[in-house]
Image (tube, grey):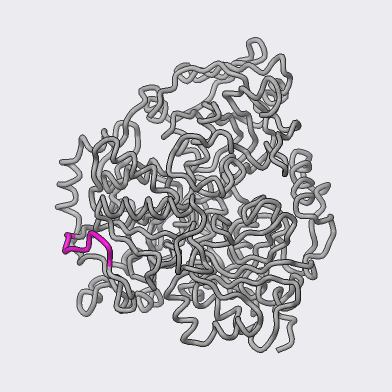
Amino acid sequence: MPPRTMYEKIWDAHAILEMDDGTWLLHIDRHLVNEVTSPQAFEGLRMQDRTVAHPELTIAVADHNVPTDNRDGPIEDPASRLQVETLERNVEQFKVPYIPLRSARQGIVHVVGPELGLTQPGMTIVCGDSHTSTHGAFGALAFGIGTSEVEHVLATQTLRQRPSKTMLVRIDNALCAGASAKDLALHVIGTLGTAGGTGYVIEYAGAAVEALDMAGRMTLCNLTIEAGARAGMIAPDRKTFDWLHGRPNVAQGEEFDAAVERWGALRSDASAKFDKTVIIDARDVAPMVTWGTSPDAVVPINGVVPDPEDFPEQQKPQLHAMLDYMGLAPGQAIEGLPIDVVFIGSCTNGRLEDLAAAAEIVRGKKVASGVRALIVPGSGQVRLQAEDLGLDLVFLEAGFEWREAGCSMCLGMNPDRLAPGERCASTSNRNFEGRQGTGGRTHLVSPAVAAASALSGKIADPRKLER
Amino acid sequence: MTRFERLEATAAPIPIDNIDTDKILPGEFLKTVERKGLGRALFARMRYRADGSLNPDFVLNRVPWANAGILVAGANFGCGSSREHAPWALLDFGIRCIIAESFAEIFYNNCFKNGILPIVLAVPEISALRETVADAGRARVRVDLIGQTVTYGGGIELPFDIAEGRKRALIEGRDEIAETLRVRSTLLAWQQANCRELPPILLGENGGAKLGHGSGGAVLLRAA
């Protein structure tokens, strides 16, 4: 067999047959289902009198729409309540495993899946959510799909796919102190552009990637979609195996050892050919902050807002519109921009390590007056683990709000939203116009920068804070 | 899937790159359990002013583009979220074809599932097309999927590329799930040969919740 990339190995292990339209039927190992992108798919099954082919490979949890302040009563927003109740009815009818809203296991599906050991190397994993790329951190092929495809997977446990091109993003050397996986990911997006990955599956490799912990790898793979690539992946290694060991749904004892053996063979062959290779030097990565309404509109924290006039003619009007929306002027320093809100959470940065990084900066200090600061753990388990470490008290004493798990202000489908004109340092994944609330201004940052900014009331460099 | 062969319609120019799916359909409109009715919310933040009135400057609020069936956009159209609500909103408004310099992948796929034809044209071609259709008297465009041409401006004909399989699927309006289910015996044989059994999904001791459904000892299959 010729040398293959990890993507090609996983593809080959799941490709069932080629259909007459040039697509392949790909077996899907795990199907994650949420309340927003599934109702129409279940309805489609009902209309055609179809069933869920493999409910045991499917797991559902409500995350996008759920309140994060109070879970005691029913959901107040009738539209949100209807979506969650519709999911509950659908999992009942189609016998799909479901994590209820009041379970301590509830959370953002991309945090919950790995926690439960449902995400494993070599798997194909899909979900009606573009940030499904997160699960690639374990050496899985994981990507977001639309609702029609959700219906196809429910009905057949397969997906019709065309093979992607492969891109190797090799990140050499080590990240500098103060630079995190989030900063690295934003730097990669800034380098590739938001469409740079279109048509590719990205494999991240190199010393800086190997050095990342699993949370960091999930952050990096999570943001792959913001560079246009549907999937990002990292070869599983000892860190991956150790992280998975002992989790529910992961094999134990000799079976685990056998699994590790199989997983180890997934790594791209040394002489495998990628369609494209991009080399990045981790030493170039500083804490990063986005200034515009596209994730590739990003500069180091000590940088300034670029001048649209320095860009090609065709891009100028849009860049001016971006600055207008963001209330920024060319040449303005990013560091020191006054902020109104800080959001720490999301499938990008809502894990225990992210909260710990923020807590380390916050400990013993106070949120600046006039700043609303939210900590929204990525899952109920993250929340419990953080509470075991006393992180909730660190945040509460500093003046942060300590919330229940959910997508929350990342996309503002629940009541956690920005008001028009409010400026937010956010650890989420998209700074699109209105993403966090109509007229809201989002600066994507790492948990450390978000925490430092909460204390300063301005975009702040955590490296400069007094300890 | 809705069939698509030919379309003659008004084309609206939207000369903006990176139109994300949040722009096409903002998140607050995702709280629906239906496919229909999203047309009113299409491009909501561009189409309506803060007080809810129509923004007279936005192209889809002006004659003749308020009846547009085609959009002519920039690069990376449909980036961001995988929400199929974006193509549903376009369809509900009456858009059946989007011509752009490039598309984001998930959105591009989602279009085909809904009978919307996404067409990629080169930058110079699309610039000229956008400029032409910005003239109210010259906004009619004819799209022929069978012949793979876009015709505008009184006879300017632009050929476009499309994967043969995608083209056929649109023309025939195929039910992909029905097609896949027709090869179910092949799927089952493949699973028999290639999948290993795993125990049912566990929520773990800390879960504090029992698994609602489907955990009753079902055979868990996955590729080896």
Furthest residue in direction front, as rendered: A73
**Majority secondary structure of magenta residues:** loop
Q: A318 above or below A209?
A: above
Which residue is more in the foreground, A171 or A312? A312
Read off the magenta span: B211-219
Q: Residue at x 33, y 51 (%)?
A: A11
Q: Position of residue B72 (x, y in %)?
A: 63, 29
Residue A288 is one of the magenta-drawn residues: no
Residue A3 visible in the picture: no
Q: A149 above or below A353?
A: above
Residue A100 visible in the picture: yes
Residue B218 is one of the magenta-drawn residues: yes
Q: Position of residue A14 (x, y in %)?
A: 28, 51
Q: Residue at x 32, y 59 (%)?
A: A59
Q: Position of residue A195 (x, y in %)?
A: 58, 47
Which residue is more in the foreground, A208 or A325? A325
Q: Position of residue A67 (x, y in %)?
A: 51, 63
Q: Quadrant of residue A106?
A: bottom left
Which residue is more in the foreground, A316 or A155? A155
Which residue is more in the foreground, A395 or B82? A395
Q: Residue at x 44, y 32 (%)?
A: B114
**Badge count:** 0
Q: A98 above or below A193?
A: below
- Asked whether, in this view, residue A421 is left or right of residue A223, the answer is right
| Quadrant in which the C terminus of chain A is drawn | bottom right
Q: Quadrant of residue A20?
A: top left
